[in-house]
């Protein structure tokens, strides 16, 4: 082979390699553009702690939740849009006062390739599962017919008759099956198993422990399960304006509520230990709880008082700064825009504003 011919071959190969390298660079650049459009591929977990008051997030009551705040960002002046689940969830999921199955966080990020799921045991949140790809009701669906019949009877019968029926029920009900919702230990176990089997997801976990009935597994009070059930019935009647609780009953309710939260906090600690902080975790409550401060119990809707709308709001992982305490006023309206910016999804949803820069810069 002559040197001239060999030189021509070298030139051809060199040109070919340059073209290949250029093509590969173009391909890589295009892939990067696609990745940038798709956003940052991290999982997002939203945990709603139903009926948890802000003033119960303390080192004494929720030490594990406080540990999460110390590793992330804690908004001390966050407020729900309303005082009942049905009225507050649209703000959390849609950044708006109404819920649209096509215009909510699950529907939007689902169109960007995320698997969206809800794990819960509360029939009230079912309407807000529209837009989610997967809904896993781990308990309440089994109780829906019985609860529906009871509600109809309660509306139509005189209060004296209802009270008598409740007394009979308290004497006959299976004490272990009285609680209408799954406890945090069951829900967290279910969620952790689900998370192991899935990726690229937005997961909403709804925990019910602070919600009525106040029914902890263990209590320091000298009360029986039957007395807890009777107290629950009195709370319901108080919420309906048919009963005035004694100071002793109010204090009993507060203690049982606090013990429910303490038990839930243990399971939040287990969740925290298993959580990958490359993902984004958001924790809040849909509303607070009233203990007769304004003449009612539980959480009547459209009652805008601090005990009912001042809520914890925590962001952790996913690039969020550690031990960040933010005292600026904010609301649930800002959760959805924050998630969208965190995932670099260039869509506008709702009326809130993103908090992402304040969490990461």
Image (cartoon, grey):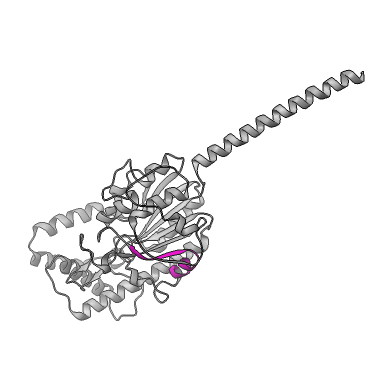
Query: Which residue is rendered at x = 36% and y = 74% of the image?
Result: 218
Give, as a single range, the part of the protein colored magenta: 65-78
- Which quadrant holds residue 223? bottom left
Q: Can you say which quadrant of the picture contains the N terminus?
A: top right
Q: Is residue 293 above or below residue 273?
A: below
Query: Which residue is rendered at x = 34% and y = 76% of the image?
Result: 219
Tell whether 155 sits left or right of 359: left
Outermost residue, right side: 2
Nearer the observer, 202 or 195: 202
Q: Is residue 46 above or below residue 16?
A: below
Q: Position of residue 200 (x, y in %)?
A: 49, 46
Is residue 75 within the magenta segment? yes
Q: In this orientation, does residue 141 appear?
A: no
Q: In this orientation, does residue 334 appear?
A: yes
The number of numbered badges drawn on the structure is 0
Q: Position of residue 17 (x, y in %)?
A: 74, 28
- Which quadrant holds residue 250? bottom left
Nearer the observer, 157 or 244: 244
Q: Position of residue 292 (x, y in %)?
A: 20, 73
Q: Position of residue 110 (x, y in %)?
A: 42, 42
Tell whether 23 sits left or right of 296: right
Q: Is residue 3 above or below residue 280?
A: above
Query: Which residue is rendered at x = 33% and y = 40% of the image?
Result: 102
Is residue 43 within the magenta segment? no
Tell whether 163 sits left or right of 336: left
């Amino acid at each position: 082979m002559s040197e001239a011919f060999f030189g021509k071959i070298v030139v051809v190969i060199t040109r070919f390699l340059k073209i290949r390298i250029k093509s590969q660079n173009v391909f890589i650049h295009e892939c990067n553009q696609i990745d940038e459009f798709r956003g940052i591929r991290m999982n997002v977990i939203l945990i709603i702690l139903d009926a948890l008051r802000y003033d119960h997030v303390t080192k004494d009551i929720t030490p594990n939740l406080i540990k999460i705040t110390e590793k992330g960002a804690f908004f001390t002046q966050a407020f729900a849009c309303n005082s009942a689940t049905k009225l507050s969830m649209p703000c959390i999921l849609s950044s708006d006062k109404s819920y649209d199955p096509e215009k909510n966080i699950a529907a939007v990020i689902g169109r960007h390739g995320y698997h969206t799921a809800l794990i819960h045991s509360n029939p009230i949140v079912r309407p807000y599962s529209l837009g989610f790809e997967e809904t896993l009701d781990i308990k309440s669906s089994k109780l829906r017919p019985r609860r529906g019949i009871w509600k109809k009877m309660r509306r139509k019968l005189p209060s004296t008759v209802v009270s008598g029926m409740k007394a009979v029920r308290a004497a006959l009900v299976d004490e272990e099956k009285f609680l209408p919702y799954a406890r945090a230990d069951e829900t967290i176990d279910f969620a952790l198993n689900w998370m192991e089997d899935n990726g690229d997801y937005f997961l909403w976990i709804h925990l019910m422990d602070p919600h009525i009935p106040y029914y902890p597994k263990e209590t320091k009070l000298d009360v029986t399960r039957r007395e807890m059930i009777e107290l629950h019935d009195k709370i319901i009647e108080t919420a309906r304006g048919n009963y005035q609780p004694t100071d002793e009953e109010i204090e009993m309710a507060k203690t049982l509520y606090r013990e429910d939260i303490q038990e839930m906090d243990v399971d939040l600690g287990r969740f925290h230990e298993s959580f990958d902080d490359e993902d984004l975790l958001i924790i809040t409550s849909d509303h607070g709880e009233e203990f007769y401060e304004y003449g009612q119990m539980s959480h009547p809707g459209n009652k805008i008082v601090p005990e009912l709308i001042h809520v914890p709001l925590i962001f952790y992982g996913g690039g969020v700064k550690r031990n960040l305490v933010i005292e600026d006023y904010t609301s649930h309206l800002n959760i959805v825009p924050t998630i969208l910016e965190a995932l670099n999804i260039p869509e506008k949803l709702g009326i809130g504003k993103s908090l992402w820069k304040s969490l990461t810069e």
